[in-house]
Amino acid sequence: MTSIQRQLIRTLIIIVPSLAALSGIVIYVYCRARLTSQFDRGLITEMRSIADGVMREGNGDLEFYFAEADHPEFRKHEHPDYFELWRADGSVFRKSASLGQSELPRIDSGQIVPIIGGRDDALRAAGFRLTPHLDLDDVPPRRSHVTNEPLYLVVASSPHAMNETLWTIASALIIAGVALMVLITGAVILTVRRGLAPLRRLATEADAIEAESLHQRLSQDSLPLELAPVSQKLNELLARLETAFRRERSFASAAAHELRTPIAELRSLAEVALRWPEDADSRQNMKDTLQIANRMEGLVRSLLLIVRSDSKPRTVRLTSIDLDALIREIWHHYEPRAQQRRLSFAYRPAERMTVYSDAMMVRAMLENLLSNAVAHTPAGGEFECRVEQSGELLQLTLANACHDLTAEDIPRLFEPFWRKDESRTGGEHFGLGLSLVASYATALGISVSVQLQSPERFKVTVGPMQVYSGVAVKI
């Protein structure tokens, strides 16, 4: 697993010293260029000084007015300067005493090049082609017959002092670079650790939260702006986890509570039959036991359906469904119970009732909705099933009379095991019907909503569902 801290430290330790080294190289190259340019300007100055001292007399003779005594750099010492003058025929006219028996190479006029001196010192030399100045004090007639031929001058100097300066600069840059690398390494490590401290603190707080302490939230005090959204999202996740855990605990507790009643009934039947066997009606006991077992089976089946719906996405198998025939078939099953409770049922179908959906899920939703309506409509009341068409979509509405629901109860109707009277247990309904309807509707991509139209009337709306027109359409 990659460590952000190590990766940042490694990257910064590579990048920052590399940039520092590059800066040092740029500084050294700049200083070398400036010093070389300054050195070359010095060569050119010396060359002009020497060229100004060459005069041609009226008789054509050359005179050299250059006092080497005033220019000690051309005398023999450890790192002297050199110059040499040639006539046009290649003969040497003058050269500095520092050259001794050596000679300088001829260099083209206007060039400055490095050469190797007589002492194997590296030199820089400049070449110049000059025309001697005429002595205007000579007799004019003689001047007219003078041929002023050019001379060739080469001036060379040792860049020893410049090299010493460059070496000093390079040494200083190297020492400063090494020291800078040590300081940068320490500064990077401290800065990265300090910068990641809030992240480590956030991780420590998150690690301390367990299933029993989901009510705790991550602190957002003194968090950097970059971590504030992370902390907020984690707190939102913790809130959802807390709600889910609370719902699961409530679900498990409610399931155990619902199972406890039929188990207690079975136990009571068995204890009575064992204690007073002569008074026990075995046939009636079997009927009671079967009824209790059927009720427990229905509860377990509903629980399995909810768990499967929540644990993984359901596979939807789309097909054409005759919604009118399906509603009439399901109602035929619940009609005896409705007649027993003196309920009146009004069914208003749409013109087109064939939909494209999952037959099993649509059947399960209708069974739960009609079963709830028959069970919870007050005796002697009425309920209505209406299917309305809008274009190629159908919407189903079930409305029934009620007497004990309030606006505060509406959001809780989809909670598993919720009942208006929480003390009531047993019976055919366990408070799971609307939970299953909502789960199926989510899988089908449709909505289910409940509304209290008035204190005495409750409405459930499901849809829209796609009308089947002979072409398979994905919902």
Image (cartoon, rainbow, N blue to C red):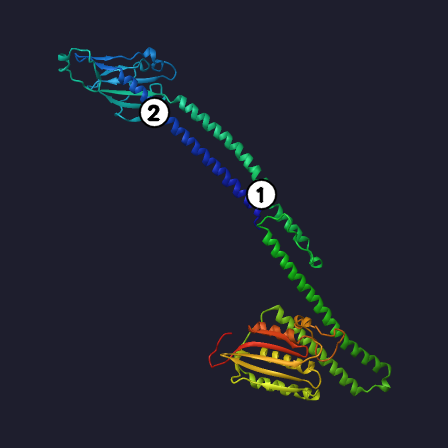
Label 2 neighbour load within 10 Å: few <14, some 14-19, many 20+: many
Residue at numbered disc 2: 40
What amino acid is labelled 1 in the image?
Val
Q: Quadrant of residue 56?
A: top left
297 to the left or right of 475:
right
Q: Which mark is residue 177?
A: none
Residue 5: x and y, percent? 58, 45
Residue 441: x and y, percent? 58, 74
Residue 235: x and y, percent? 64, 57
Q: How many marks?
A: 2
Q: Is residue 67 above or below residue 456?
A: above
Residue drawn at (79%, 84%) of the image: 285
Q: Are marks 1 and 2 in contact (CB under 8 Å)?
A: no
370 to the left or right of 137:
right
Residue at numbered disc 1: 192
SS for callout 2: helix
What amino acid is labelled 2 in the image?
Asp
Residue drawn at (74%, 80%) of the image: 292
Q: Is residue 263 above or below residue 2?
A: below
What is the distance, in whole Å, between disc 1 and disc 2 at their CAs?
49 Å
Q: Nearer the viewer, residue 143 or 36?
A: 143
SS for callout 1: helix
Residue 348: x and y, percent? 58, 85
Residue drawn at (15%, 12%) of the image: 140
Label 1 neighbour load within 10 Å: few <14, some 14-19, many 20+: some
Q: Quadrant of residue 183?
A: top right
Q: Quadrant of residue 47?
A: top left
Question: Which numbered disc flags the more N-terminal residue, 1 or 2?
Answer: 2
Q: Is residue 266 above or below residue 412?
A: below
Q: Nearer the viewer, residue 399 or 245?
A: 399
Q: Is residue 131 above or below residue 386?
A: above
Q: Nearer the viewer, residue 120 or 173?
A: 173
